[in-house]
Structures are given as structure tokens and as C-alpha cells.
Amino acid sequence: MTSPRPRPAPAPAAPSDAAPAGRANVAVECGWGRLIFGQTFRDPADLVDTLLQEQPGRRDVAFYVAEPHVVLALAPTELFLDPSHAFRLALADLDEGPPPHGVRVRGIRGPADIGEINRICLARRMVQIDPASAWPAAGDSLLTYLVAEDAGTGAILGAATGVDHVAAFDDPENAASLWSLAVDPQSPHPGVGEGLVRALAAHFRARGRAFMDLSVMHDNTQAIALYDKLGFTRLPTFTIKTKNSFNEKLYIGPSPEAALNPYARILTDEARRRGITVEVVDEPTSLFRLSHGGRSFVCRESLTSATSAAAMTICDDKALTRRLLAGADLRVPDQATVTDDEAARAFLDRYGAVVVKPARGEQGRGIAVNLTTPEEVTAAVAEARRVCDTVLLEEFVEGEDLRVIVIDFKVVAAAIRRPAQVAGDGRHTVRELIERQSRRRAAATGGESRIPLDDETARCVTRAGRSLDDVLPAGETLLVRRTANLHTGGTIHDVTDAVHPDIVAACVKAARVIDIPVVGLDLMVPDVRGPAHWFIEANERPGLANHEPQPTAERFIDMLFPQTIAAARIRRH
């Protein structure tokens, strides 16, 4: 698709050219905070006063500030210049384009939609919407909330907020703006964000608006590429916000641990917030030391010097993990070490479907699931031996893959992990869809999640009756991996509040059997709300960043430095 050639956008009105009398000093409540229209303020002191009235838990934005240096000079310790760019789309030039395959965009219908929007906002570390602000009075055209949903399942995949400037203050430029664009990082469909932007632009064009503006962080290269593609042009205006804990990373500069991976950085960020000294010991392995009040711990992500060598040995050896948990009367699937083809065939005959895995390894490498033929088992054993010489056969257990995080012998987070899948669009091959989905997963996880195009992926595609070079019909979903590990493209869905008490108790017991202070336990469960479960393995270095917004980093630092708990609670409030 060729984007229309953008035409030059007019500059925004300066503060001295304020809106008509009676519509000055305008601030619109958007649910996540107030959108403050800088061009409606004649006196910079009034704009400062408005910004400093920000309520707890809200995030106000002063947009269209033409002279930010004047505003900041009045409150340099309370306000900061947001490092974002402003963009404008001339709606007359909008190329509506085709809607994304498998996705439809609509307005919000009820509280359930707001709940789903807030789930996505939490996953994207954005402020949630206050439901009371999402239901304007009848005939009120000020705010528009759109959601994108899966056309097949109805699952909410993304959301956007629109503000009509004419309704807000009789905007002489006849503009509108887009805010809070958020797409579920687990979405299986491409183009969700683009579909929302196009739909909101079409909505405002139908109202007769001339422009749609937005603000985007300067380093959000994916979003900026999208806006360039759609014909947006840079707008010479600025944004000012109030300094608070939520915005802190935008005005304190990069931390000395900026090069650490996301699993380490979530912990060092929490430590720094509490005044704990952070020292990077080795950047390539994300090894760091935390020190405070005479206590010091060396950590590699969530693995710390508080974890004993014995506990690490238990987690490293999957057969040993299983034996100890079984000895404590915890439920585990049957397992055997591969000795020869005949023994492997006998094990397969006994259970009908098996899992092949290396006895040692992580991140799902070398694991093949739900194998039902001797030929599949033989090939999987050869692949697993590339990871570890000792290979295990395990009874295949039907159910969902549940990861439970236990810190200091308390369950802090739980999530269902689902294998990678792609959604057909009738145009791209399975291989192309996997590559596109893999790029999206990598972008959503800081490069931690990708779908490998390897023998296991090819096997899964073949078992589904497809080949990598087939064009997948529009609306058809194809499972391309059997394991649900994040590192092989799996998605993760928080279920902390839904886990059955029996599973919670069993996980605490398992952590005590291993005697490990931080552990990620993998289970298969028919239903997280029911008591049935089977322990599969234990991970001594679980990725805590995968479980946000659950307070995994906070509980991790609480465990290591309990003397900082009170200070942390005061800071968060």
C-alpha cells in the first residue's frame, strides 16, 4: 500500500492566541488523567497551577505547550519536559485501507470492556482507565473509546481513546487527538494498532474534523514507523508532565544498569527506588550486586546468593526434581530415562503419548510434547541429546501449562502459558506468518520471545495437516509449537487470583521440599480453578518480569532487604 503524500501541517496556536472567551484553561478528564490543552492558557502560571493539581493515581498531560521553557521556569522541581514527539494527520488525506484480518473495531459497550482495556494497560505499564469517566452523558461527543476485538473469539486485543477538541473548547483548528493506544502484547493478529488508528481517524473525519493529533515517545520506533506510514507529520509543539513515581524513568536519565536484560532490570529498578546500591558485576550475563545496611547479595536475574547450591542442583536435574517431589507425596507424571529404542517404545506403548526432554536445560530447548509414534520419539530423542546427553521420557498429561512464582515460600504470581500460534490472513504462508509473529513477540518482550523455525515447529505444522509454505486461509488459527515457553514464542496470561487453594498449598510445599527462596514451578492443570495438578519441573531463575503487574520485583526485594519494606510502601503511596 502506498501512503498518500502528507501535506504540511499548520503550527498550533501559541498560548497568547488562546481559545475563545469562556473556553480558556481547558482540562479534559480522560479516565487515566487529564488532557490539559496548553493553547487555551493565556498565563503560564495558570497552566502550572493546573498541572500541580494532579490527583494520586492519575497521570495528567499538558499538550500543545508552545513555550515550555517559560512554564518549566515556574516549577522546575515539580514539572518536566516529556521526551515525546507530537504528530498530526490531515484527515482529508486519510487512506482508510483494509481492516486487519480477523479483527474488528467497535466502541465500548460495558464494564467488561473497561476491565479488558485495563488488563492491557497493566501489561503495557500504562495507567488504567477510571470506569466512571468512560461513560459520558448522552449526546456528549467529547470522548470516544474504541476497542479492537478478535472476530472469532471476541477477545479484546487493543484499545484507543479519542478526544474531540471542538467539543472540548471550540477548537479553531477543528482538530481531534488520539491517546492511550495500547495493544495486547499477546495478540495473535498483526495490524491491531494500525486498525485502531485508522478507525479513530475515520470516526473523526466523519464528524468533520480536519486533523487528528497524537503524542508518542521519541524512542518508540515501531509506533513512529506506523505513523509515518499512515501520513502523519511532526507537529512543532511540546508536552509537559508532573514529576511522580510513574514518570520517574522519563526525567531521571538512564540507570547505570540500562544494558541489563529485562529480567534483571525489573529488580535493579525496584532496588534503586528503595535506595539500595546496585553494582553491575558482569553485563553480558546480567550479574549484579545489591547492597544495603550491611546486607549484600549477588544476583543473576532472580537467582541470588541466597539460593543454595543444593537447591540449584535439584532444579537443574529434572529427574531429581521429580523424585523429590514424588517422595513428598506431590503429584508428578511418570518418567523414565531413555536407554534404548526398545525401552522408549515400551514407555510410549504404556501411555500412548509422551514428552521427550533433556534431563538438564532451560527455556524449552530440546523439549518435544505429545509424541505418539516411535519415529517421532526417535527424532525427538536425537534433538534432545544436542542439549544434554541424558534424555527423559515423560508421561504426557493433558491440560494447560501453569507457571507459579513462589518467593519466600509465598505464592506471588501465577500465569497460564500458551504455545505460539499464528492466524491466517489468506495472503501469507505459514512461514511468513511465523516470521511476522516472531518479530511482534520479540518487540513486545524486549527480544526475549521468538518462534524458532526449527524441526519442532515444522513437526507441529505438519501434524496439523499444513506445510510451512502453505498459505493459511483467513480466520484459521494454527498451533506452531507444543511447548509454551516464552522463549519459543509462547504467550503468558495472568491467573493469580483464580488459582485453586490446593494448587497454591502444593506449590508452597514444593518450594519447601526444594528449600529454595525464589522458584518458578511448572505444572499441568486441567483447570486453574480446580484442585487437579501435576508438577513438571522447577526453575531456579524464573523471569519475574513476565508476571507484571503482579508485585514479583517488590516481593523479591522484600525478601532480600526486609528493612526497606516500610520505606517502599510510603513511596508507592
Image (cartoon, grey):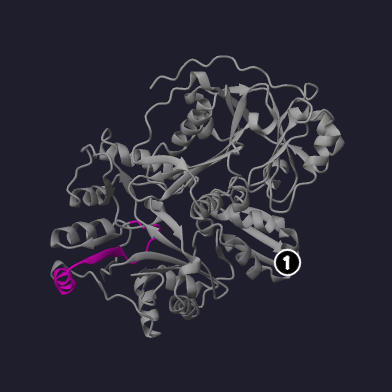
The location of residue 270, given as percent across then percent down, is 66, 57
- The one nearer the camera, 526 or 30, is 30
Q: Is residue 20 above or below residue 360?
A: above
Q: Where does the N terminus fall, quadrant-wise?
A: top left
Residue 348 inside the magenta-drawn segment: yes
Q: Residue at x 28, y 43 (%)?
A: 475
- Where disc 1 sits, the SS reads helix
470 versus 88 height, above or below: below
| Residue 371 seen | yes
**Quarter assignment of residue 319:** bottom left
Answer left or right for 464 relative to 51.
Answer: left
Instruction: Tell me where the magenta segment starts and ends, as one range.
Output: 343-365
Q: Quadrant of residue 242?
A: top right
Q: Nearer the viewer, residue 154 or 377?
A: 154
Give the image location of residue 354, x and y in percent: 23, 67
Position of residue 280 relative to residue 416, above or below, is above
Residue drawn at point x = 49 percent, y = 77 percent? 508
Nearer to us in this view, 92 or 470: 92
Q: Is residue 108 left or right of residue 296?
A: left
Residue at image coords 61%, 44%:
137
Q: Where residue 536 sits in the image (x, y, percent)?
A: 36, 70
- Disc 1 residue type (three-letter): Thr
Q: Which residue is mark 1?
A: 564
Query: Which sits in the foreground, 370 or 38?
Result: 38
Label 1, residues with CA under 10 Å away: few <14, some 14-19, many ≥20: some
Question: Was residue 158 drawn as part of the magenta stretch in this picture?
Answer: no
Most extreme residue toward the front is: 138
- Quadrant containing the C terminus is bottom right
Left or right: where 263 falls relative to 336: right
Tally the marks.
Answer: 1
Residue 217: in sight, yes or no? no
Q: Residue at x 50, y 31 (%)?
A: 203
